[in-house]
Amino acid sequence: MRTLGSIGPRETPADLWRWRWALSNLLWADFCARYRNMSLGVAWSLLNPLVLLGMFAFVFTYAVQGIHRPYFPVFLLLGVVPYNFFSLSLSAATPSLQYNAAIVKRVPFPRTLLPLATVLSQALHFGVQLLLLGVFAAIGRVPITRQWLWLPAILALELVWVAAAATLACMLNVRLRDMRYLVESGLVVVFWLTPVFYPADAVRLRAPAWLWRLYSLNPLVGVIDSARAVMLAHQPPHGPTLASAVGVTALTLALAAWTARRIAPTCADYL
């Protein structure tokens, strides 16, 4: 027998738009709850990338001495900040339906609002970290060129992909309770397969062609490689990696929508 919460709006863009007021409330509640009773508040959004920046700068300056690049702090942040957004969004969004089971069982609303609100909340922190990136770019006197106009499109591409991946993982977690642990393990693998602290060229020049194509299926490769190209090399985005990121994003978005339409209407029965 289905509960009231298992009967609700369909998971379509029109439904999400009609429920945008609920999405904004969920977003603000998640953002406020995250730093409640914390003395540093939103400054914690800056602490994590700063710690990683300091660690990588030390390791690759004094220990490994394998990477010598101009604007190295900005180079690192262009890898750390996008990866952090993906990692934190996916980790938080995957169990969001499970953690809000009481609401899901009682109130009919589009279930995809919960993972989307989580991702958008992380996007606010992402924006704060981008300000930190801007500060380091100013300190390092990184030249501003017209190629920087590509940045909004590159960041929007990551936002869409992360939202799709988080929604897909959240829906699968309703039926597969091991999903959150698969995500945790997968994020470790993705970290090393993402050019966070090394240039994508290091793989492009050394790996066989088939392995490079497989490696570039990670949308973060296209996002980070393109962001570094436009900000630091003053060149247009790297076409093949960006095209690969667009293709995988479109596929993930379609798969997430298909999965949500099938799992969301009955997810309350599995929570």
Image: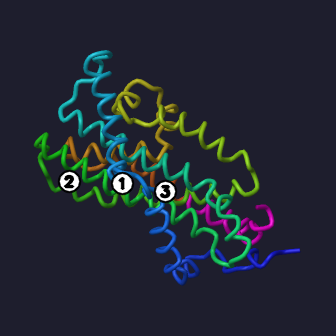
Residue 55: x and y, percent? 33, 28
Instruction: Give the residue displayed 32% in from the left and 16% down from the top.
Output: 64
Q: Is residue 211 above or below residue 60?
A: below
Q: Position of residue 72 (x, y in %)?
A: 23, 33
Q: Are dots 3 and 2 in contact, CB under 8 Å?
A: no
> Dot 1: few (<14), some (14–19), or many (≥20) neighbours within 10 Å?
few
Mark 3 or mark 2, which is nearer to you? Answer: 3
- Front: mark 1 or 2: 1
Pointer 2: residues within 10 angstroms few (<14), some, or many (20+)?
A: some
Residue extending furthest toward the right:
1
Asked whether the beta carbons under mark 1 and mark 3 sit within 8 Å of each other, the answer is no
Q: Marks 2 and 1: in contact by CB < 8 Å?
A: no
Mark 1 or mark 2: name the one nearer the start of the chain: 1
Q: On the image, which quarter does residue 169 sit in?
A: bottom right
Q: Position of residue 145 (x, y in %)?
A: 14, 52
* Badge 3 density bin: few <14, some 14–19, many ≥20, Cα 10 Å: many
Q: Determine which quarter of the picture holds residue 146.
A: bottom left
Secondary structure under the numbered disc 2 in the rendered image: helix
Q: Is residue 96 left or right of residue 116?
A: right
Rendered residue at 23%/24% (across/down) = 68
Quick one: 105 or 110, which is closer to the camera? 105
What segment carries the magenta color? 251-271
Report the front residue among 201 and 119. 119
Hey, what amino acid is under mark 2? Gln
Identified by mark 3, the residue type is Trp
Q: Which residue is the site of mark 1?
A: 41
Work out how far the residue at label 1 is from the one at label 3, CA to CA, in angstroms: 28 Å
Residue wearing tag 2: 147
Left or right: 108 as drawn, with respect to 221: right
Q: Secondary structure at mark 1?
A: helix
Residue placed under numbered mark 3 in the picture: 161
